[in-house]
Image (cartoon, helix red, strand yellow):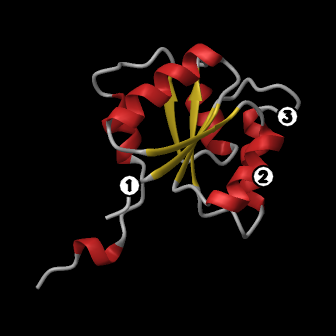
Amino acid sequence: MKPPRVLIVDDNPMNLELTMFLLGAAGFALESAPEAVGAAAQIMVSRPDLILMDIQLPIMDGLAFTQQLKADPKTQQIVVVAFTSYAMRGDEARMRAAGCDGYIAKPIDIASFAAKVRSYIPTVASETTTA
């Protein structure tokens, strides 16, 4: 079975380094981009299973980029998880309303982070068939 492919869109080098370390150790295939334009180009080539989307990005914020992805038939099926320090009441609902399929608040719990990300990866029906 191929490892799940995750694109991390985050412009903070320390967040990116920690996230890549934790998910890499858990067996994910990883790519990263510091902003939406670079991420858009990578998405068309690599077709990730999941995108961890920071909300505060330069040029185009993560919610606007998520809306763009969800409006495009070529990318609307990719799971987008908001990955943000916005953790006030109502923030998760706002992000889901913008099209995010999930929400992970920063700072992360390093012990459970990889499992939480994995919980958002869509399963393939053929992997769960019974005899």
Classify residue 112 as left or right of residue 78: left
**Whole-percent x and y of residue 57?**
77, 26
Could you say which disc has been placed on residue 41 in the image?
Answer: 2
**Whole-percent x and y of residue 109?**
36, 19
Q: Residues within 10 Å of mark 1 (few under 14, many from 20)?
A: few
Could you say which disc has been placed on residue 3 in the image?
Answer: 1
Residue 87 appears in view: no
**Whole-percent x and y of residue 65?**
77, 43
Q: Which residue is mark 3?
A: 60
Extreme-right residue of the structure = 59
- Secondary element under disc 2, as helix, strand or loop, is helix
Q: Residue, x 28% and y 22% (percent of image)?
A: 111
Asked if disc 2 and disc 3 are in contact, CB closer than 8 Å, the reply is no
In three-dimensional space, the C-alpha distance between marks 1 and 2, rounded to whole angstroms, equals 21 Å
User: In front of the other: label 1 or label 3?
Assistant: 1
Q: Vertically, is 122 above or below 11?
A: below
Q: Residue, x 36% and y 29% (percent of image)?
A: 113
In three-dimensional space, the C-alpha distance between marks 2 and 3, rounded to whole angstroms, equals 14 Å
Instruction: Name the amino acid type tagged 2.
Output: Ala
Extreme-left residue of the structure = 131
- Secondary element under disc 1, as helix, strand or loop, is loop
Instruction: Name the amino acid type tagged 3.
Output: Met
The quarter in which the N terminus is drawn is bottom left
Q: Answer with the quarter of the image where residue 123 lies.
A: bottom left
Instruction: Name the amino acid type tagged 1.
Output: Pro
Q: Residue, x 34% and y 43% (percent of image)?
A: 27
User: In front of the other: label 2 or label 3?
Assistant: 2
Residue 79 appears in view: yes
Q: Answer with the quarter of the image where residue 10 lies.
A: top right
Number of numbered discs visible in the structure rendering: 3
- Secondary element under disc 3, as helix, strand or loop, is loop
Nearer to me, 17 or 72: 17
